[in-house]
Image (cartoon, grey):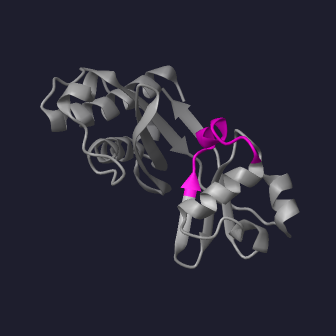
Amino acid sequence: MKKEIQDYLLAVAKNAIAKELGKEEVKVGRPDAEVLGEKRGVFVTLESGGRLRGCIGNITPVYPLEEAVQKNAASAAFDDPRFAPLFAEEFSDIEIEVSVLTVPEKLEYKDADDLLAKLTVGEDGVVLKKGYYEATYLPQVWDEIKEKETFLQSLCMKAGMPADEWKKGELEVLTYKVELLK
């Protein structure tokens, strides 16, 4: 994705938050780019002082890219149930990261060892599904959890399943890539 489009999408995210807080929005020209109208999966992550402050997104391509960035930025700032809504005083310290996802693809695997062999640390975003249980980790989570087994255990627990559920071979596993905008 061209730098001007990346810069524009980061401005869209920042402006979505600024608008809700009554802050001045950044003026930026909209590039003439078809990708802005393409439906894409998008996550917006907010950090403050190197700590997570909000992260909301959609894995599947539901909204056009520009709209997805706008909606998810506002949701990350004000609707992430793990955090209090963003305060106006925090706005200048927030770092915004936009993850534009490829469409998740089902990962076929035979057993736990095969699953481990097929995952690429640092590159794969992973979705685990079983019945009503579902969770995802963006590829950036590999920066914090570098061991594949620990990554999968943590992701199982995030989904509300036992930590060793990934070893049983009954999960649907999907992977995706991310274009990271900072």
126 over 52 or under it: above or below: below
Q: Which picture quadrant has residue 91?
A: top left
Quarter of the picture containing the N terminus is top right
Residue 74 falls within the magenta-colored stretch: no
Answer with left or right where residue 127 lies relative to residue 132. Answer: right
Q: Residue 59: where, in percent of width, then height?
A: 51, 55
- Nearest the eye: 5 or 172: 172
20 over 39 or under it: above or below: above
Q: Residue 151: where, in percent of width, then height?
A: 68, 51
Answer with left or right where residue 141 lies relative to residue 148. Answer: left
Q: Residue at x 49, y 21 (%)?
A: 3
Residue 137 falls within the magenta-colored stretch: yes
Q: Residue 61: where, in percent of width, then height?
A: 48, 55
Q: Which residues are magenta?
A: 136-147
Q: Residue furthest left?
A: 22
Q: Residue at x 54, y 72 (%)?
A: 133
- Nearest the eye: 94 or 172: 94
Q: Residue 13: where, in percent of width, then height?
A: 33, 34
Q: How many marks?
A: 0
Residue 31 visible (yes or no): no
Answer with left or right where residue 112 lies relative to residue 178. Answer: right
